[in-house]
Image: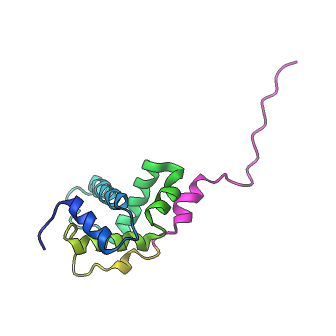
């Protein structure tokens, strides 16, 4: 399949599967670029393919960097509810010709990598059981 402009691929993907917003696909591409750069920092010559779990973890870090505690709200508005949705989007882009895959890649590679609650909500919750430190006493 020949490469097509990414905007056209997104249009085609949204037409074929309207569960996900066009902005989600752009974010996915940016998160993939971010993930590749991060993987190359640890091993500059080794990155020729990003696995489903690697992409999910990279996307997690990128989402927190970009949106902080608003990630759940943004993702919900885009139709993203779990890591399987990330895989569905990847395969929608594969079907348009925008992304490529290896023979062993499958959408199930993206299942249950983490829960969105654990990844995007829990980090922002206050830690229970911690008592505030006492105020230093002032001289009378």
- In this picture, is 13 found above or below 36? below
Horizontal and vertical percent position of residue 66:
42, 48
Q: Residue at x 37, y 60 (%)?
A: 24
Point out the image quarter for the N terminus. bottom left
Q: Residue at x 52, y 59 (%)?
A: 72
Q: Is residue 46 visible?
A: no
Q: Is residue 125 above or below residue 112?
A: above
The magenta-colored residue range is: 113-140
From the top left corner, tell me how far across and down residue 117 is, in percent.
56, 64
Q: Is residue 95 left or right of residue 1?
A: right
**Foreground: 59 or 21?**
21
Q: Residue furthest right?
A: 140
Residue at the far left: name it.
2
Question: Hey, which quadrant is residue 86 in on the image?
Answer: bottom left
Identify the residue shown where x is 47% and y is 60%: 77
Q: Nearer the viewer, residue 88 or 128?
A: 88
Q: Nearer the viewer, residue 135 or 92?
A: 92
Residue 90 shows in this picture: yes
Residue 121 is a magenta residue: yes
Image coords of residue 45 (percent x, y): 19, 59
* Left or right: 84, with 96 as reference point: right
Viewport quadrant of the C terminus: top right
103 within the magenta span? no
Residue 50: give x, y in percent of width and height.
Answer: 28, 67
Give the main secondary structure, helix, strand or loop, of the magenta stretch: loop
């Amino acid at each position: 399949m020949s490469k097509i402009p990414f905007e056209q691929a997104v249009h085609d993907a949204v037409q074929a599967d309207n569960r996900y917003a066009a902005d989600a696909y752009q974010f996915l591409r940016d998160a993939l670029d971010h993930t590749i750069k991060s993987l190359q920092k640890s091993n500059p010559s080794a990155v020729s393919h990003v696995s489903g779990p690697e992409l999910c973890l990279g996307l997690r870090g990128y989402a927190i960097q970009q949106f902080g505690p608003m990630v759940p709200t943004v993702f919900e508005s885009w139709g993203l509810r779990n890591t399987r949705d990330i895989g569905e989007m990847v395969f929608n882009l594969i079907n348009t010709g925008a992304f490529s895959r290896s023979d062993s890649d499958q959408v199930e590679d993206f299942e249950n990598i983490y829960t969105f609650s654990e990844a995007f909500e829990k980090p922002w919750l206050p830690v229970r059981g911690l008592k505030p430190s006492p105020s230093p006493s002032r001289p009378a």
